[in-house]
Structure formats: C-alpha cells, structure tokens
Image: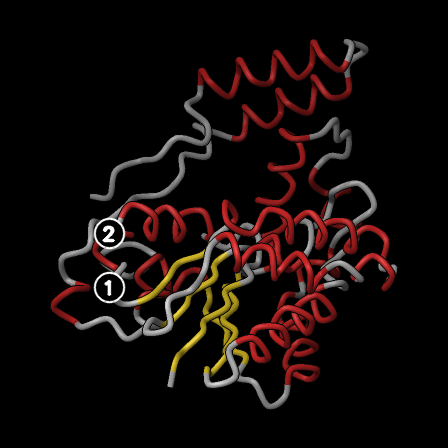
Amino acid sequence: MRQILLHPGFHKTGTSSMQHFLWINREVLEPYFDLRMFRHMKPVVRLASLFSRTNNPLDLMDMVGLLDDVFTEFPVRDDRDLMISCEGLAGQLPGEPGVEDYGAAPTLLTYIAGYLAERFPNAQVKLLFTTRNPHDWLYSAYRHQLRAHRLTLDFKAFAATYQSAADLDRIIAEVAEVMTPLPVMFMPMQDALSHPLGPGTALVDQMNVPADVRATLTPVGKENEGPSDALWEQFLTLNRSTLPDRAVAEQKKALADAATLGRWKPKT
C-alpha cells in the first residue's frame, strides 16, 4: 500500500533544518518517495494563512481546487510514496497579526488529509508533528516576530500573551480527535536533533528507504540564529523607535546580515 506522510510542522520545531536536509538529498531519495514542500504548496499555504486569521469556513471553499492545481502541476508517481513537509499547512505562526494560536489547524488538516485520502484511495495517510518545549518554542517565535514585524512587546509580555499557543500537545490532541482513524504522531524536536545526520533523517526514517541508502545521505547542521540575545534587544529597540518602517526594516536587515542570521552551520 502506498504511504503518505504529512508533516505540517509546527513552526519553530526544526522544520527548516528538516526541509533543508530533504532538499539537498532529494536526488538520492527520489527513487523512494515524491517530496512536496512549501515551494510546491504555495497556493494552499496562502489559503491556510488566510483561514488562520479569519476562521471563516467560506475562505476554505477553494481548498480542493487549489490542491487539485498543486497535484496537476506537480503530479505524484503511481509507484512512489509521498512526503509533504510544510508547516504553513497548519496555518500561520502565532504572533502574526490576527493569529493568536493554532486553533485553525484541526480544520485545515482535516481538509487536507481528507483530500489526500480521497485522491489516493489506496494510500495510508498519516500525520507527524514535530514539537518543542513551550518556553523554547515561545522564545523562537518571539525572535521570529521581532525580526519580521514591528513587534514592541518584550519577551515576558509576548510569552504571557501567547502562552496558550505554546501548548502544542493540546493542538495535536485536537487534531487526533478529528482525524480518527488516521494515525497522528508527534516527535519532540530534541529527539530529531539527536540523530547523527541531522533532524531531517527523523522524517526519512518514517519512509520506506533502505538503511544502506539512509547511511549515504548528506548531513546538515542547523540554522544560525545569531550570536547572542543582544541582537534581539537591538531589534526590539529599533521596533520601539520613532524611525519610519522602511528604515527599521533596513537596519534590522543590516544587523541580521552582520550576524549571519539565517545562514546554515555545517554539521560537525
């Protein structure tokens, strides 16, 4: 039976490292499963982002059509398994304007998993979430929003505001309840990071890839998140300043570039 693994995040749980690993090893993995990520799922992610802000069911009317378009543009081979790794399918990262938590995720994933089960009726669809402890998840989300937006809250205030969003286990339980009988699994980020080849292998281990092939995969390190907390304090100061938005964005970009923020460290 064909296997479909849907990995919808969550954000800030090592997903970028996982997807970087999958992409640089795509040619080795290509004989064993088709891979779909954000670059393939952009229209669906845009719709999921809209719904996570509005929670209006009418916004999902185009979901099936958009998924049809994705699989028409990027068809899945009949003789291969399928992996979809894209955290945007669970909605936007909490802390984005209008997004308080992952409350939209159960509805979104019901639509998407249901579509996959109907389009590929002979496949076993299963979900795998990656998780992170609440404090570290909140701090990572906070840093992301400091850089991406003109957030003026300090971390203590941000954590108090979005504390419920960090309860990822609750969201997984809600998804599992509405997805029955489809399997819903989770993997703590720390467990994935402990793999010798990097966290992406935790996803590959769920697929039908021979052990000798997995041993040849190219390892990756992790994304560089900056030298110290001082960088984030500088972002906060800029966000709270009276400078125009464009000037703030330019100065934050210069600081990020100087700190090599977002670049990849090699696996050692």
Quadrant occupied by the N terminus = bottom left
Q: Would you say the residues marked 1 and 2 are in contact, meaning their CB atoms lie under 8 Å apart?
A: no
Classify residue 166 as left or right of residue 194: right
Residue 77 drawn at (x, y percent): 37, 67
Q: Quadrant of residue 263?
A: top left
Label 2 sits on a secondary structure element that is helix
Classify residue 58 as left or right of residue 232: right
Residue 81 drawn at (x, y percent): 37, 72
Classify residue 146 as left or right of residue 211: right
Which mark is on residue 10? none
Q: Amino acid at mark 1?
A: Pro
Residue 211 drawn at (x, y percent): 16, 71
Eyeballing the image, is 65 above or below 39?
A: below
Which residue lies most toward the front here?
A: 72
Q: Amino acid at mark 2?
A: Glu
Q: Quadrant of residue 176?
A: bottom right
Residue in the image at 56% along x and 52% along y: 41
Camera-side residue: 54 or 134?
Answer: 54
Judging from the image, the colouring scheme is secondary structure
Quadrant occupied by the C terminus = top left
Residue in the image at 73% along x and 35% along y: 154
Which residue lies most toward the bottom here?
A: 181
Residue in the image at 60% along x and 18% along y: 252
Spatial CA span between label 1 and label 2: 8 Å
Tag count: 2
Classify residue 122 as left or right of residue 53: left
Give the class, few, some or many, for how many residues have Cα within 10 Å of label 2's Cα (few <14, many ≥20).
few
Q: On the image, numbered disc 2 is attached to which residue?
A: 27
Residue 120 drawn at (x, y percent): 51, 78
Label 1 sits on a secondary structure element that is loop
Q: On the image, numbered disc 1 is attached to which residue?
A: 31
Camera-side residue: 57 or 160?
Answer: 57
